[in-house]
Image: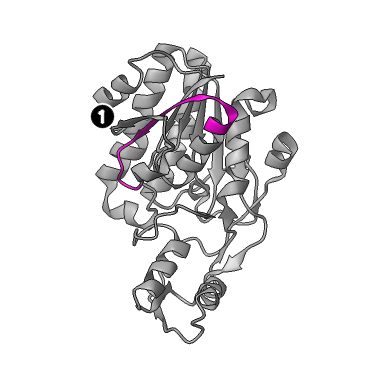
Amino acid sequence: MERVLVTGGAGFIGSHLVDALVERGDEVVVMDDFSGGFERNVPAGVALLRGSVSREQDVAAAFADGPFDVVFHLAAYAAEGLSHHIKRFNYENNLRGSVNLINAAVNTGVGHFVFLSSAAVYGHAAGTLTELDVPQPIDSYGIAKLAVEAELAVTERLFGLPYTIFRPHNVYGTRQNIADRFRNVIGIFINQVMHGRPLSIFGDGNQQRAFSHVADVVPALLAAPALPDARNQCFNIGADSATSILGLAERVLAEFGRPDHPVVHLPARDEVVTIQLSHEKAARVFG
């Protein structure tokens, strides 16, 4: 049994990871500021701390009861397009908050640090992208994630904190927050149908996304600290096959039995049109 900290553990992906850790028999502490998570997502008996990684005193409180074997850092405000307009908030939460946590991990001798980065670090990079391709983030969210990746590499070299980085993309599944108007297009579409509003698509809807079920992402996070080949490595993680945003809209409406529900096309925005990631490395290490 290990003692682990999960930041963002009341959120979508984090709560699924917490479930898996509890099932494995680990002692789990969840830290969440509930900006996107819900207390109901945390299993009974799990220690739950209300706090933000952006506040040093909250991070200190999380570590006050003793060291952790593993820290899983999933807390972030993940709104890529919106991050341009909330730069200070983005960097306070996603970069400074991560540094607060990394510092605490070093100072308390954490055995392994698992960081949930994002495919947003690749930006407009073309082709089938591997972890060796040069990231080209196009928004403040991607910049913050890439900076944390670099900080972990430097910290490991200077202070010996082992880490594993994951770059997931377009994760969906139960417990995703469909009330959030800025994050996760599947949830946004579902919310719009439920409230009788037209589905809003930016541009022509031919943007391609490989939507990844949360159950295909969590097992790799869970396994990483114990696998030597995952130590100090970065992994793309997610689905191989892509779907257009227009095709997704049609699928959502079909599931609701409302194929004639209105769809509106808004002006195109500066976003990734098509991204294809290689998952060969993850498949080799995690099976």
- Quarter of the image where one finds residue 217: top right
Percent coordinates x, y for residue 37 in the rendering: 36, 45
Percent coordinates x, y for residue 58 in the rendering: 27, 26
Residue 136 against residue 50 in the figure, above or below: below
Q: Is residue 154 magenta?
A: no
Extreme-bottom residue of the structure:
260
Q: Is residue 27 magenta?
A: yes
Query: Does residue 154 appear left or right of residue 32 in this picture?
Result: right
Percent coordinates x, y for residue 146 in the rendering: 46, 39
Q: Quadrant of the C terminus?
A: top right
Residue displayed at 28% across by 47% down? 87
Residue displayed at 38% across by 79% down? 198
The three-letter amino acid code for the residue at tag 1 is Arg
Please name whichever residue, 287 or 163, is drawn nearer the observer in this view of the structure: 287
Percent coordinates x, y for residue 149 in the rendering: 48, 33
Please name whichever residue, 178 or 89, is drawn nearer the observer in this view of the structure: 178
Span of residues in magenta: 22-36
Please tell me whether mark 1 sits on a helix, a strand or a loop.
Answer: loop
Query: Does residue 281 appear left or right of residue 48 in this picture?
Result: right
Question: According to the image, what is the colour scheme of the structure?
Answer: one colour
Q: Which residue is mark 1?
A: 55
Residue displayed at 28% across by 32% down? 51
- Quarter of the image where one finds residue 197: bottom left
Residue 50 against residue 181 in the figure, above or below: above
